[in-house]
Image (cartoon, rainbow, N blue to C red):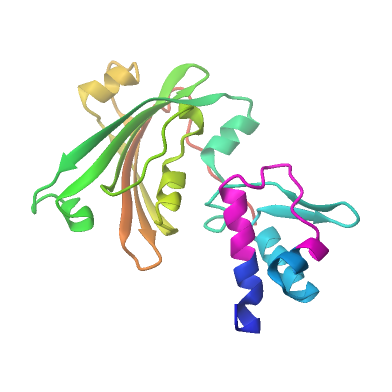
Amino acid sequence: MSKNSTLYITVMEVIKEKIINGYYKIGDFIPTEIELEKEFGVSKITVRKAIELLEGEGYVTKRSGKGTTVISNSIFNKLSKGDSFSNILNQEGYTLRKEKTTFTQMNLLPQDELYNYFGENCLKVTRIYYLDGKPYIYFTHFLPENLALDKIEDENNFSIYMQLYRSGFHINNFHDEFYIDYPSIDILNELELEDGPTLGRRRVTYDADNNVIEVSLAHYNTRIHKYVINYKV
């Protein structure tokens, strides 16, 4: 923290880290400006700039005379001004739950596409999302083999992207492709479908150095609910 021009960024990143990792929970007040000045040994202007950045990224809201409240702990705040699909479903009154999470170590060959991203081995994670108790999305994630995984105590709160974050893989951007897909019999059975097609989504996630840190495939049963995107302007 030697350069004044970057002090507020450092302060912002430390506070954001605490929000993402649950030290400050949604609904909590973060320390006051005076407390943050003492904690970081910086000026009031530096603290205010840090809070402005956090507010701009959607992590906190500041109200005069009431303090600064945490409103989000999502690592995707900085990536998009659109509501996540899961948030949209929750706002519509649906209940979305994650179940049947499985982990498999995969051996890859040079001719495999994933070999170009992960080398000889990667971690495969599959899980199913249920919408009001009905199987809705079948997910398959391919991840670095050295990903450190927390013990799953509650599948619904187990986040693949949080595991990446805590393992030092910082997401910078991702690329989504949507298409019509005819999935395997196993996936159709899990989605309780007799036949296809389903809406498919392929996501490739990158870090700041443009290295691929995740490839995921999703199959949506849009007969239950269409895929929706809402953007804030």
Pick whichever, 29 or 88, lies toward us.
29
Residue 105 is at least partly visible in this image:
yes
Residue 81 is one of the magenta-drawn residues = no
Report the quarter where the C terminus lies: bottom right
Where residue 199 sits, quadrant-wise, is top left
Q: Height in image: 47 above or below 61?
A: below
| Residue 225: % across, % down | 49, 27
Report the quarter where the N terminus lies: bottom right
> Where are the magenta residues, as a range?
12-35
Badge count? 0
| Residue 172: % across, % down | 44, 61
Q: Residue at x 69, y 68 (%)?
A: 40
Q: Residue at x 25, y 29 (%)?
A: 183
Q: Height in image: 116 above or below 50?
A: above
| Residue 119: % across, % down | 17, 55
Q: Residue at x 59, y 36 (%)?
A: 88
